[in-house]
Image (spheres, rainbow, N blue to C red):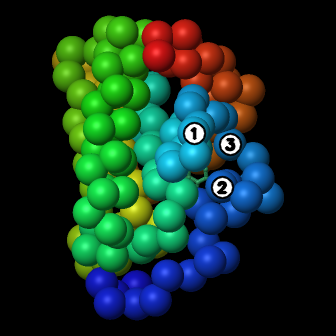
Amino acid sequence: MSLFAQYDPQNIFAKILSGDIPSARVYEDARILSFMDAFPQSRGHTLVIPKVPASNLFDIPAEDLQNLITQTQTIGRAVREALAPDGIRIAQFNGAAAGQTVFHIHFHIIPVWEGENEHPHAAGTMSDLNELKDIAAQIKAKL
Ligand code: AMP
C-alpha cells in the first residue's frame, strides 16, 4: 500500500483494537494499546499502536505521535526490566515499499540477545496466544 493510501478501517490492528481479533495485551488506556506481535522476531517482540486511525507516521497528528513514542519508551523500559535483553530495537515502517505490512501506525519493540538469531520481519509461524499472554503478563508486571 502506498504512503498516500487512505486508512482502511478493516485492517488487522483496527480489528485488534475493537476486540474482533484476539491479542496478548500488555497495556491499554484511552489513547494507545500495546500487545505482543503474533509473529515475533524475538521473544518479547511487542507492538504499540495509537487508537487514532492513522496509517503511518505522516498521517498521525503530532500530539498523538508524541504520546505514542513516549508510551513506547515506557513499555520498552518494562520489556527491558522483564526480559533483560542485551539490546532493544525500536522499529517503525511507512509504506509497503519500506516493509510496512499492517497499515495502522505502530512501533515495534524488539528485544535482542547477543548470539541469538532473530526471525525475519513479518514472517514465520504464528505464536501460541497463551505463550504470548505469559510474556505479556511478565512485561505488564514491570509497568
Ligand atoms: P509492519 O510490517 O511494520 O507493518 O508490522 C506489522 C506487524 O504485525 C508484524 O510484525 C506482524 O508480525 C504483526 N502481526 C500481524 N498480524 C498480527 C496479529 N494478528 N496479532 C499481532 N501481531 C500481528
Type of amino acid under label 3: Ser
Q: CA distance from mark 1 to mark 2?
A: 11 Å
Characterize the local packing of mark 1: few (<14), some (14-19) or many (20 or more) Cα atoms within 10 angstroms: few
Q: Earlier in the sequence, mark 1 or mark 2?
A: 2
Where in the figure is residue 63, as x and y percent of width and height? 30, 57
- On whether ligand 1 comes within 8 Å of the CB at mark 3, the answer is yes
114 or 104, nearer to the observer: 104
Residue 115 seen by the camera = no
Q: Who's the residue at 40% across and 90% down the image? A: 5
Between circles 3 and 2, the one closer to the viewer is: 2
* Tag 2 residue: 17
Q: Earlier in the sequence, mark 3 or mark 2?
A: 2
Type of amino acid under label 2: Leu
Q: Are marks 1 and 2 in contact (CB under 8 Å)?
A: no
Tell me the number on the disc at residue 23: 3
* Tag 1 residue: 29
The image quarter in which residue 97 lies? bottom left
Q: Are marks 3 and 1 in contact (CB under 8 Å)?
A: no
Q: Who's the residue at 20% across and 22% down the image? A: 87
- On whether ligand 1 comes within 8 Å of the CB at mark 2, the answer is no
Tell me the number on the disc at residue 38: none
Determine the secondary structure under disc 1: loop
76 or 42, nearer to the observer: 76
- Left or right: residue 43 versus residue 110 is right
Q: Does residue 123 lie above or below 60 as drawn?
A: above
